[in-house]
Each structure stands twice: as structure tokens, then as C-alpha cells.
Amino acid sequence: MSVALLWVVSPTSEFSNGTVFLDSFRAVARCNNLIKKGQKKSRKFGSTNADSGYRSSRFSITNSMIATPAGEIALSSEQKVYDVVLKQAALVKRRIKKSNEDLEVKPDIVLPGTVTLLSEAYDRCREVCAEYAKTFYLGTLLMTPERRRAIWAMYVWCRRTDELVDGPNASHITPTALDRWEDRLDDIFSGRPFDMLDAALSDTVTRFPVDIQPFKDMIDGMRMDLWKSRYKNFDELYLYCYYVAGTVGLMSVPIMGIAPESQATTESVYNAALALGLANQLTNILRDVGEDARRGRVYLPQDELAQAGLSDEDIFAGKVTDKWRNFMKKQIARARKFFDDAESGVTELSAASRWPVWASLLLYRQILDEIEANDYNNFTRRAYVSKPKKILALPLAYAKSLVPPSSKPSSTLVKT
């Protein structure tokens, strides 16, 4: 299943064959060639701000409890994810408290086993981003040099991770291979990068208050794809969407930055990032129903299918019926609610980061419109936003990016 790398606006061609690194750890030179192999469904980078609406600082833990058949109390997926949100927000708060100065530019370092400088590593990430996420890449040029380089490095890592289970060599990936990839992630955060692309991310995580947990959670999402092809309810699907898309929001917020004048809480910023990530991933799922079914996968809540009088067999048959239309209307409404929850917070980001996020939100939300225009036939017709519509959306996204953040605290956006 394609992961929504939230900030990437162009939902078309992708790249990256990261699987060979796990088993053979070949030379850096070959890494640069392998990065261009494979075609991939796009993910979307994204993160926004403000009170997401579905959970925020007003999050009700009581409402998140689930009673198990044995009478035990278990946390819902939303509460599990929110616990991660609180951890990320606290990390950012500590960094802001420690220093309000601009990020310091560190000297280039020599990569392991090569004479290539760190600046060249970032440049390689830039090339990958420019080639496979063209619209988003243009948006990153509005950021400060340090922020744009960091986003490029993060984009490359997420793409490589996605390709492990969704790329041309996905059939050869095992849980052990993902364990090795996670070990390699630990090395990145410990300042022991293996190759050029790892080195760029390793430097990034020393410059920004980026925590390792969302990265590990994304790998858990890849593990889930190895063994799980059905989701019995939305709680299960929510956790999967967090793993493969919401995590990118948590990774991105510290790099995108919060506007200094914003009165939003740090937690609300992360909640909005989650909302956009979940919305984009749910949109991916609804767009790709037919494609996933041909791979034997159904990323739809089984209980809600049953309530609509549908089953996996109906999906595999690929017939658009009134039952299917009614079911899809409800699924689309849910995705739109997450987009709405995220929208109110985009303005809380730093000024130079808003445009690509607005573009991501506006363009990806239009995919839902296209599903409707196709009469809910997401079995044999792939919904996509045409180039003219993309072009029209970009000026609107830019205009929205000029709206300043909230300057007065409210009941939902309170400075902490």
C-alpha cells in the first residue's frame, strides 16, 4: 500500500530501491544508481498545525478506552498515537526553551569510506526530490537552506523505506530484513551513517528536534504490510494509517517549523500534522481499491463493509452498485473530515513552509472529488487530478499561505 508522504504534491512517479541495502550493503556508488530504479505510487509529505478536531489537547482518555472480551481495558489506536504526539511535542518544547536562536550551520563531514563531503550528500537528496516530486521540490525552495535540505533528506529515507515492501524487490523482503533496516536507523541517529543518503539524515537529526520514534513506527507499518491484508474496523486502519503516513507529519513538524507569532499549542500542531497524514492515506486507500484488490489486499474496515451489505467478494468482483456508492460516500466523508481538521492549522507553520503544505492539502483532497466524478468506480478507473487543475490550485495554495497565524489565543489554540 502506498504511503502518503504528506508534503509531496505530485502524486505520480516515484523511485527508490532500498532493499538491496539490507542484505548486501553495497557501495555508495551503486546506491546512487539503485535510487532511480522502480516505479512507485506516490506518497505525500505533509504536516500542518492547530487543533485537529478529532483529538487535541482536549483529548479524552476515557473515550479512548476499549473493553476487551476478558473485561480488561485497552487503549484505542488514537490514544496510542496521541501518546507519541505528546512525546514529540515535549521534545520540541525543550529545544525551543533551550535556544531560540537560528539553527547553526555545521561544517561538512567526510562520509564513511569516501571523500565525498556532506554537502554532496544533501545535493544527492535534492536531485532525487527534484526528479520524483517536482511540484513539492519547487515549494521547498521557499524554505531556508537548512530546512529544505533536511526535508530532502527525510523524503529520501521515507521513500527508501516504502520501497522495501512496495517496490520491485518487495517479494524478497522479510521481517529480518526490516529488523536490519531498523538497526541501520539506530546507527543513523547515533551518528554512524552507512552511506551518502544516510549521512544526510544523520546530520539532519542533529540539527532539528527530530525524534526516532516516528521513524521506527513507519518501519512497523512496513512490517504490518508483510502479514496483514485485512482490517476488521477503523481503529485498526487508523493505526496503520498513522504508521505509514501520520508518522511523516511528526517527522516534519520540527523541520517545517512553527511560526514565532503563532498562539497554537505544540500539541495542536502535531495533531494537525496527523490529521493531514491520515486524510492523505485514507484518500490513497479509496483511490487504490481496485489496484489493492488485485494484490489480494483490502484496506477498508471489514465491519463497515458488512454493515453496508458488502464483502471482500464484492470488491474483488469490481462492480459499482448502489450499496458500493453509499459505502464510498461515507468513507469519503470521513477522509474529508480529516482534511477539514488539518486545514485550520496550516497557517500556524512558519511562513516559508506553508505553501507546499497547502498545495498538498488542496490537491490531494481533489482526488476525492475525482472518485465521485468517476461514479465511485475505483475498481477500474484511477482518480487523478489533471494538470490544469493542479496549476489552478497552486496560486490558491500560495494565497492561503500568506494568511498569518492566529495572533490571539482561543479555547483550542493556546500558547503553552
Image (spheres, rainbow, N blue to C red):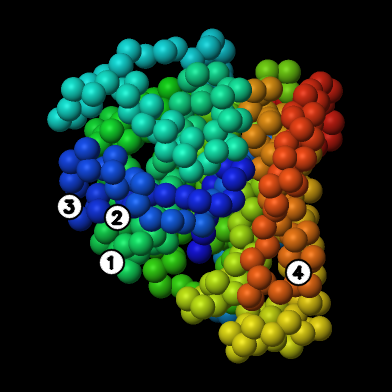
Q: Which numbered disc, 3 or 4, marks the residue closer to the eye?
A: 4
Cα separation, mark 3 vs mark 4, equals 45 Å
Mark pair 1, 2: CA separation = 8 Å
Q: CA distance from mark 2 to mark 4?
A: 36 Å
Contact between labelled residues 2 and 1, with CB atoms less than 8 Å apart: yes
Per the rendering, the mark at residue 19 is: 2
- The answer to the question of whether label 3 and label 4 lie on touching residues, with beta carbons closer than 8 A, is no
Which mark is on residue 374? 4
Say which amino acid is labelled 1: His
Q: Is residue 72 visible?
A: no
Task: Name the residue: 42% across, 61% down.
Answer: 166
In the rendered structure, which disc, 2 or 3, sits on the residue that comes first in sequence?
Answer: 2
Q: Are marks 3 and 1 in contact (CB under 8 Å)?
A: no
Mark linked to residue 172: 1
- Dividing the picture into quadrants, the one containing residue 115 is top left
Instruction: Choose the circle earlier in sequence order: 4 or 1.
Output: 1
- Looking at the rendered structure, the secondary structure element under dot 1 is helix
Amino acid type, callout 3? Ser
| Residue mark closest to the camera, 2 vs 4 | 4
Q: Residues within 10 Å of mark 2 (few under 14, many from 20)?
A: many
Extreme-front residue of the structure: 388
Say how many tags the image has: 4
> Does label 1 or label 2 sit earlier along the sequence?
2
Residue 73 is situated, as x and y percent measured from the top left of the image, at 59, 67
Write the residue at 32% across / 69% down: 171
Residue highlighted by disc 3: 24
Give the class, few, some or many, for how many residues have Cα within 10 Å of label 3's Cα (few <14, many ≥20): few
Q: In the displayed structure, does residue 385 sit left or right of residue 33?
A: right
Determine the image quadrant of residue 88: top right
